[in-house]
């Protein structure tokens, strides 16, 4: 009985190993570095996330925003970049309600008790309504975002040699 359990366990682990070996880098699309800075009302956004979703399909790239507003995207690993092509972008910057200044008044009114509030307009967290679109080139990319309560602007810094 115990021998059969060990045999099944061995074959389960062997099967998983073969399956996972087939899910390696051979299926990954090429990515290119993407980094930049996110600012809100002229000041670095101190926390949050940036998400790039390719319009032509492929892996989503994302990054956490550092306290200085900087980010560096990753698709398959933390900082490997994004696939080339046009991407819709969303930026999220939520914090728990009642955790000090920074939340927009309309968010505090919408969520007076508990939950998270966005410190930037919620439209930037909506992929279809953010108005943020970026083309990632097959080279290192620097993409900065200047957000305000009314609009968002994308600044692509040409890093071609």
Image (cartoon, rainbow, N blue to C red):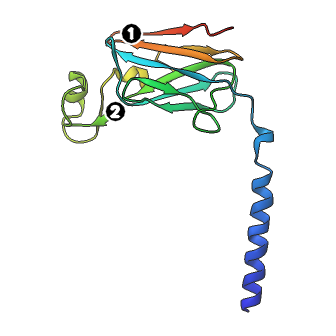
The quarter of the image holding the N terminus is bottom right
In the picture of the structure, the residue carrying the numbered disc 1 is 151
- Give SS at disc 1: loop
Find residue 16 and report its horizontal and vertical position in percent: 75, 62
Cα distance, mark 2 to mark 1? Answer: 18 Å
Q: Is the residue under label 1 in contact with that under label 2 (CB below 8 Å)?
A: no
Q: Residue at x 55, y 9 (%)?
A: 156
Q: Is residue 157 left or right of residue 59?
A: left
Q: Residue at x 66, y 33 (%)?
A: 59
Find residue 21 and report its horizontal and vertical position in percent: 78, 53
Which disc number belongs to residue 129?
none
- Give SS at disc 2: strand
Label 1 Cα neighbours within 10 Å, binned few <14 / some 14-19 / many ≥20: few
- For residue 107, what is the image quadrant? top left
Which disc number belongs to residue 94?
2
In the depicted structure, whether residue 98 falls above or below residue 126 = below
Residue 23 is at least partly visible in this image: yes
Q: Which mark sits nearer the N-terminus, 2 or 1? A: 2
In the depicted structure, whether residue 62 falls above or below residue 155 = below
In the depicted structure, whether residue 59 falls above or below residue 154 = below
């Amino acid at each position: 009985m115990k021998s059969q359990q060990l045999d099944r366990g061995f074959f389960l682990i062997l099967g998983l190993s073969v399956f996972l070996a087939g899910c390696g880098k051979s299926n990954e699309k090429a990515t290119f570095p993407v980094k930049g800075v996110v600012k809100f009302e002229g000041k670095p956004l101190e926390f949050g996330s940036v998400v790039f979703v390719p319009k032509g399909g492929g892996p989503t790239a994302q990054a956490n925003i550092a306290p200085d507003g900087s980010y560096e995207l990753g698709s398959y690993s933390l900082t490997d970049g994004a696939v080339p092509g046009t991407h819709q972008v969303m930026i999220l910057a939520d914090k728990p309600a009642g955790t000090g200044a920074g939340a927009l008044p309309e968010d505090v009114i919408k969520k007076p008790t508990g939950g998270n509030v966005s410190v930037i307009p919620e439209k930037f967290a909506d992929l279809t309504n953010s108005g943020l679109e970026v083309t990632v080139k097959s080279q290192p990319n620097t993409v900065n975002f200047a957000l305000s309560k009314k609009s968002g602007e994308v600044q692509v810094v040409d890093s071609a040699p």
